[in-house]
Image: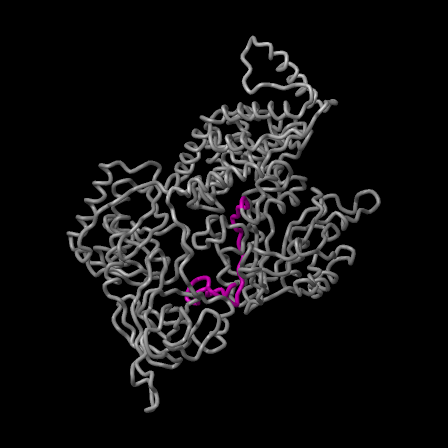
């Protein structure tokens, strides 16, 4: 196996930077061609449809849907281009590579996706021709080793073949290297809903035409052949898949390409496995030091005696996943993405203990090598690696306490499964030593030896681990069902698990837990502006809402620009109609739309009489109750009910917010900032905000901390907040250039959030202009200073009082 070194002409770091520099140099709307956009976190902060960021395009989804606020950094990319290397995790959900990791040379749960994008700018021709230029002229990959696919169409869905893409490829490659592909391989979808479209894959043949007979690998494309692998996918986003499966054309056409860095590096370093590159070599060396196992040899399948090399691959992949995911704000737990991380961690720990003879704690010891090897490209890894190590170590120790007993239970369950399958031996569940049944035990041992050697054994049925045993492994020892299935698959003879029976037991357990009195109700009614509705607004000449008045909240007058009934736009709505919910769009507003954890304003819109003309108008004076306020691509939607009269497009309306609700929310939001400061002062700088809720009746603040907060610490936190309130400090808010504001000493920002430029700074006890005049002053460490777009009181005294009512862990480390 080749040993990659940092002296290789194409180390991973150079490959990554060359890709980025290539697209930044291409001419475009901006002076530098494609804009470099740093990777988003692997934990989607504002997309409930995703467990993890699983593709480079995830952070650009609002642009593809036409929902990006024009004033935001994303909104400014509309009509432009971008390039980056995106951190991705594919484990759980539609895109799940977890069960393949370790078994082959190219699957990963964590990987880097090199990508370039066009947001309504260039399309198929530029994307494909630039891609070939980079691969063949810059990276020097032989053209005759490349194969391209295009979408062959799907008549049942009314989708035509992508002839344009086919013809472009025929001008660049031999016709025999241009292949049609079906819906599965050549129609890309991010999830069950969301942006999608036909795609064109580029495949690479590791062996090439130099092989005897002038090899043509066209028949091996997309067959799973390890030597003919997909390296780059060019997606032409034209549709949005909506709930129910409907495909709706998007207002603009986009390009989204993704190329796996690890696969590309393996090609450029001339090795047949991603795991034989300098991406994984340092981690393998660390695994060898931590476990004392023999060196990695790159073996697969039956050649991998004892699954030692499989264990190396699993552990190296999984430590990258855990390190990045925990750094970006996720933690192992029993729910959602936290449960996926727990499964991954336990899978790695089991391989280390059982295959490599590792001791508990070995897995957390691998965090530093990931940080050292990848910290330059992703500096967030260097922020607090000790916290990541601690979380992994706690999980590892917790699982380690039950791992040996769980493995023993699995072996007992396997004995029973073999006993049920053979015709001449029946083994009781418990066999006391010295009993006559020892003869049966010896017979079972001989049968297992024959099975392991693949010798002839008389079976009365298949070898199946029972659903009861599989459920006990999960319920008592924390073995996820996929881990039990994997342990069964590792046997040299065929063993299966009764997964359907397990699923039934799991469903029954969940139903039993729910029967304790919890009630589940349908979601409340809600209307949204989708990409098509937003495009229609722009076509109608309706501009995004001016919401600068949302901070003062005083009554203002505005003009109705559009009325949305959830499906279409109406010219008017009246109290006699059967429409339950209506959304009103105005040219400007003083209402605060729900965002950043702060709940929305409520209030009313009243038609001013002078906006109506004519004695026959019987509906003058219509009144609209605003129950919810939401923002979509810069359009503020006032959602509610018409209480009386009528409202028409073009009407002038008086906007009056519910000042009682606004005041309560503002008090709780400012108190949240004080709480953030008090937590840092009491618990240390390791406290980071992980979420929040600001409502009229309460506030909730989620923060990182490795242990429960002690009663005396809670008392100190509460006292600090009360002292700040009693000090009657002024609360100041101003916009400032982002690069200047980021340099202010003591600034607190939510990791992973994308902030606009200029950014709004909220400071308690110090004027923003003073902060900007002397940003490095140590004085500011005693003040609450945050980036925030919410509403606040003018002085802390207005908060009144503050009390902590509860504290609990919502996930490990949070």
x then y, percent, for residue 20 = 55, 54
Relative to residue 308, is residue 122 depicted above or below? below
Please tell me which residue is depicted at 52% across the width and 33% down the height of the picture. Answer: 471
In the image, residue 447 above or below residue 371 = above
Given residues 195 and 296, the one toward you in this image is: 195
Q: Is residue 121 visible?
A: no
Q: In the rendered view, tell whether residue 475 sits above or below residue 325.
A: above
- State the residue at coordinates (27%, 71%): 656
Magenta extent: 65-92
Q: Position of residue 376 (x, y in %)?
A: 48, 45
Which quadrant of the rendered structure holds the N terminus? top right
Residue placed furthest toward the top: 434
Q: Is residue 689 magenta?
A: no
Residue 757: tell me if it is visible.
yes
Left or right: 433, with 652 as reference point: right
Q: Quadrant of the C terminus?
A: top left
Tally of numbered tags: 0
Horizontally, is 450 left or right of 689 in the view?
right
Residue extending furthest toward the bottom? 615
Residue 131 image point, x, y percent: 64, 57
Quarter where residue 481 is shown: top right
Q: Residue furthest right?
A: 213
Q: In terms of depth relative to the viewer, which is nearer, 553 or 600?
A: 600
Applied colour scheme: one colour
Between 17 and 438, the residue placed more toward the observer is: 438
Res. 591 image quadrant: bottom left
Q: Residue at x 43, y 30 (%)?
A: 398
Q: Quadrant of residue 561?
A: bottom left
| Magenta-colored stretch includes residue 91 | yes
Residue 246 drawn at (x, y percent): 58, 63
């Amino acid at each position: 196996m080749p040993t990659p070194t940092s002296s290789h002409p194409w180390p991973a770091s150079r490959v990554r930077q060359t890709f980025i520099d290539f697209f930044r140099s291409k001419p475009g709307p901006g002076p530098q061609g494609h804009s470099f956009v740093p990777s988003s976190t692997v934990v989607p902060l504002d997309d409930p449809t995703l467990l993890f960021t699983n593709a480079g395009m995830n952070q650009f989804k609002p642009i593809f849907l036409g929902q990006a606020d024009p004033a935001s950094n994303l909104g400014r990319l509309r009509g432009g281009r971008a390039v980056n290397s995106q951190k991705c995790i594919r484990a759980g959900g539609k895109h799940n590579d977890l069960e393949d990791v370790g078994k082959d040379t190219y699957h990963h749960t964590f990987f880097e996706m090199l990508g370039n994008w066009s947001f309504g700018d260039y399309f198929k021709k530029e994307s494909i021709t630039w891609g070939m230029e980079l691969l063949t002229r810059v990276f020097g990959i032989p053209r005759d080793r490349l194969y391209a696919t295009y979408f062959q169409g799907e008549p049942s869905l009314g989708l035509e073949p992508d002839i344009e893409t086919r013809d472009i490829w025929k001008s660049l490659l031999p016709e025999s290297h241009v292949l049609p592909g079906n819906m599965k391989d050549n129609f890309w979808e991010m999830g069950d809903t969301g942006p999608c479209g036909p795609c064109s894959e580029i495949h690479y043949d590791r062996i090439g035409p130099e092989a005897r007979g002038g090899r043509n690998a066209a028949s091996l494309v997309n067959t799973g052949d390890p030597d003919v692998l997909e390296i780059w996918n060019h997606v032409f986003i034209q549709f949005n898949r909506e709930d129910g499966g409907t495909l709706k054309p998007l207002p603009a056409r986009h390009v989204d390409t993704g190329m796996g860095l690890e696969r590309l590096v393996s090609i450029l370093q001339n090795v047949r496995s991603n795991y034989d590159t300098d991406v994984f070599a340092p981690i393998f060396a660390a695994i060898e030091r931590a476990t004392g196992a023999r060196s990695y040899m790159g073996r697969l399948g039956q050649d991998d005696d004892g699954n030692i090399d499989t264990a190396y691959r699993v552990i190296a992949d999984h430590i990258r996943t855990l390190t990045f995911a925990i750094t970006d704000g996720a933690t192992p737990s029993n729910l959602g993405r936290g449960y996926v991380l727990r499964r991954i961690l336990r899978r790695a720990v089991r391989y280390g203990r059982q295959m490599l003879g590792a001791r508990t704690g070995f897995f957390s010891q691998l965090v530093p090598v990931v940080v050292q090897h990848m910290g330059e490209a992703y500096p967030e890894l260097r922020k607090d690696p000790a916290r990541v190590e601690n979380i992994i170590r706690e999980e590892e120790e917790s699982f380690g306490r039950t791992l040996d007993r769980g493995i023993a239970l699995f072996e007992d369950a396997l004995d029973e499964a073999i006993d049920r399958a053979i015709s001449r031996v029946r083994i009781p569940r418990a066999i006391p030593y010295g009993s006559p049944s020892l003869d049966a035990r010896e017979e079972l041992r001989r049968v297992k030896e024959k099975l392991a050697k693949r010798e002839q054994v008389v079976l009365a049925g298949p070898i199946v681990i029972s659903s009861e045993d599989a459920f006990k492994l999960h319920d008592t020892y924390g073995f996820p069902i996929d881990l039990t299935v994997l342990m069964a698959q590792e046997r040299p003879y065929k063993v299966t698990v009764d997964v359907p029976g397990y699923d039934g037991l799991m469903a029954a357990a969940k139903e039993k837990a729910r029967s304790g009195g919890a009630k589940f109700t349908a979601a409340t009614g809600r209307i949204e502006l989708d990409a098509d509705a937003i495009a229609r607004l722009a076509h109608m000449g309706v501009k995004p809402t001016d919401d600068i008045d949302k901070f003062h909240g005083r009554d203002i007058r505005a003009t109705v620009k559009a009325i949305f009934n959830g499906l279409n736009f109406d010219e008017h709505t009246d109290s006699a109609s059967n429409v339950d919910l209506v959304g009103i769009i105005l040219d400007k507003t003083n209402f605060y739309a729900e965002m950043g954890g702060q709940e929305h304003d409520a209030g009313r819109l009243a038609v001013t009489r002078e906006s109506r003309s004519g004695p026959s108008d019987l509906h003058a004076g219509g009144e609209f109750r605003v129950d919810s306020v939401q923002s979509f691509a810069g359009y503020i939607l006032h959602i509610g009910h018409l209480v009386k009269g009528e409202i028409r497009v073009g009407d002038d309306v008086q906007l009056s917010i519910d000042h009682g609700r606004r005041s309560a929310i503002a008090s709780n939001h400012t108190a949240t900032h004080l709480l953030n400061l008090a937590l840092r002062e009491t618990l240390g700088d390791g406290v980071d905000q992980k979420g929040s809720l600001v409502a009229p009746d309460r506030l909730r603040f989620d923060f990182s901390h490795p242990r429960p907060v002690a009663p005396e610490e809670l008392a100190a936190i509460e006292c600090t907040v009360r002292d700040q309130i009693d000090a009657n400090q002024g609360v100041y808010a101003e916009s400032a250039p982002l690069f200047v504001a980021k340099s202010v000493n003591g600034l607190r920002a939510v990791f992973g959030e994308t902030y606009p430029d200029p950014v709004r700074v909220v400071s308690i006890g110090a004027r923003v202009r003073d902060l900007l005049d002397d940003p490095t002053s140590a004085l500011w460490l005693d003040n609450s200073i945050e980036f925030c777009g919410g509403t606040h009181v003018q002085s802390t005294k207005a908060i009144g009082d503050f009390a902590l009512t509860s504290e609990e862990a919502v996930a490990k480390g949070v």
